[in-house]
Amino acid sequence: MGENNFKNKLKSKFIVLDGPDGCGKSTQLNLLANYLKEEGLDIVKTHDPGGTAIGDQIRRLLKYDAKGEMDFHTETMLFMASRAQLVAEIIKPALENRKTVLCDRFISATCAYQGSSGYPLDWIIKLGKFAVGDIWPDLTIIIDVPADEGCKRTGRKRHKRTIMNHKHANQGHLFEDVTLDRFDSKTLEYHRKVRKWFLKLENNFPGIVKIVDGSKAQINTVHQRIKEVILETFS
């Protein structure tokens, strides 16, 4: 693909990197952003949840400030509200200005974490579409790692705040600095379920979903594979 053609095909594209805890998505998002900038593209890099002043307030509420036991539906809708603001304030204007948007997690994360807990995937997707309208990722790349490897990579620091005030304490995994409720006795098994749900999204999620193996691979090897996926998808 010629340089100009490549740039044109990636303008106004919305690309999400997601995956289980410890998959390295944040590192890979930074590498991808730098690569695309070097290719001459105008990049907007953001993250979910948060990414806006209002979204960050919702993020703090979900992480620390909620008083009492939060119902799953309340929790999920707050995540979707943060995404709605992110789309309205950051993502949609960027796409309209022919910029390329890269996002660290999106609705795919809720599908995996909540789907693994038994909530219907179609319900989550329907709620997600209500929140973000027609601004759906053109490409979602899931960086796959086994649950035990991911947990070893992240480590759970006990001095970090927990999410014990959340009834189900599942979407807390969307935050990188929140530990599991100490009463959760099946942490590794839960992460294994989440990984399985991420892998299911390739055939059950709107838009294009590609799986990239992030296990036991060098960071640059994963980066090269992500670049290949993007070239294959938008060629």
Image (tube, rainbow, N blue to C red):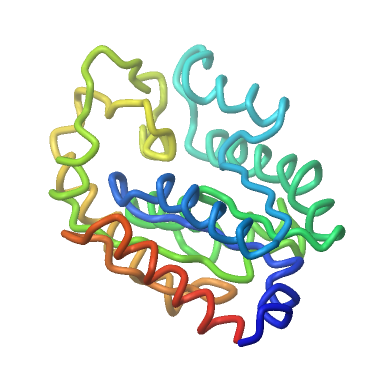
Could you tell me which residue is drawn at 58 percent across and 51 percent down?
103
Q: Nearer the viewer, residue 120 or 102?
A: 102
Location of residue 116 in the rendering, given as x and y in whole percent from the top left corner: 33, 55
In this view, 131 is above or below 67: below
Quadrant of the image containing the C terminus: bottom right
Is 42 left, or right, of 212 in this rendering?
right
Is residue 126 among what the camera can see? Answer: yes
In this view, 75 is above or below 97: above
Could you tell me which residue is drawn at 68 percent across and 71 percent down?
10
In this view, 128 is above or below 12: above
Is residue 197 among what the camera can see? Answer: no
Could you tell me which residue is drawn at 20 percent across and 23 percent down?
182
Is 226 left, or right, of 190 in this rendering?
right
Is 116 left, or right, of 28 in this rendering?
left
Quadrant of the image containing the N terminus: bottom right
Where, by quadrant of the figure, is residue 47 drawn? Answer: top right
Q: Nearer the viewer, residue 65 or 20?
A: 20
Location of residue 225 in the rendering, given as x and y in whole percent from the top left corner: 37, 71
Location of residue 232 in the rendering, given as x and y in whole percent from the top left corner: 51, 84
Is 44 left, or right, of 215 in this rendering?
right
Q: Nearer the viewer, residue 5 or 113?
A: 5
